[in-house]
Amino acid sequence: MTYNEKETMKKFGENVKRYCTSMGITQEKLAELCDCSPQTISGTETGYSFPSSKVLFKIAKNLNIPLMFLFNFGEDSEISNKAENFLILKSLSKMSIEKKKIAIKIIKAIDEVV
């Protein structure tokens, strides 16, 4: 599917926000890590503006993800699967041992049903 500039900026921003949220990184913290203003990150997340190439690469680096994850809008199932696996692993890594055990039980139960 082809997206116009506005749609691309919006989807890109949604991805940035999703990864920040999953990692517990605020706009202010990401701005600090990327050596830019919080307004730059806010504008990026809302799709109002697009970061410079310098900031773009810093966003991916500081989120510890391949740049292509930010440009994946769901069309490439292989990239989507890798991105979802990344988010799941990040979520699990933040959990206590007890919560991880519960999550594993839930995953096993889901796997048995499907």
Image (cartoon, grey):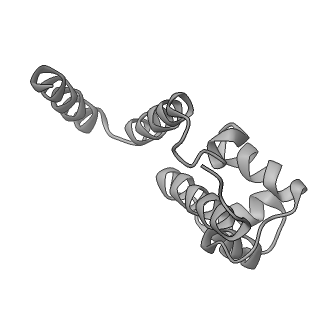
Residue sitting nearer the eye, 7 or 45: 7
- Residue visible at 79% across and 58% down? 34
Q: Is residue 29 above or below residue 80?
A: below
**Horizontal side of residue 25 vs 29, given as left or right:** left
Question: How many numbered callouts?
Answer: 0
Residue sitting nearer the eye, 75 or 67: 75
The C terminus lies in quadrant: top left
Residue 40 in the image: state x and y as whole percent. 76, 73
Q: Quadrant of residue 13?
A: bottom right
Q: Quadrant of residue 52?
A: bottom right
Q: Is residue 83 above or below residue 19?
A: above
Residue 92 in the image: state x and y as whole percent. 38, 36
Q: Is residue 48 above or below residue 98?
A: below
Residue 17 in the image: state x and y as whole percent. 56, 61
- Residue visible at 51% across and 56% down? 18
- Residue visible at 63% across and 66% down? 7
Residue 42 in the image: state x and y as whole percent. 66, 75
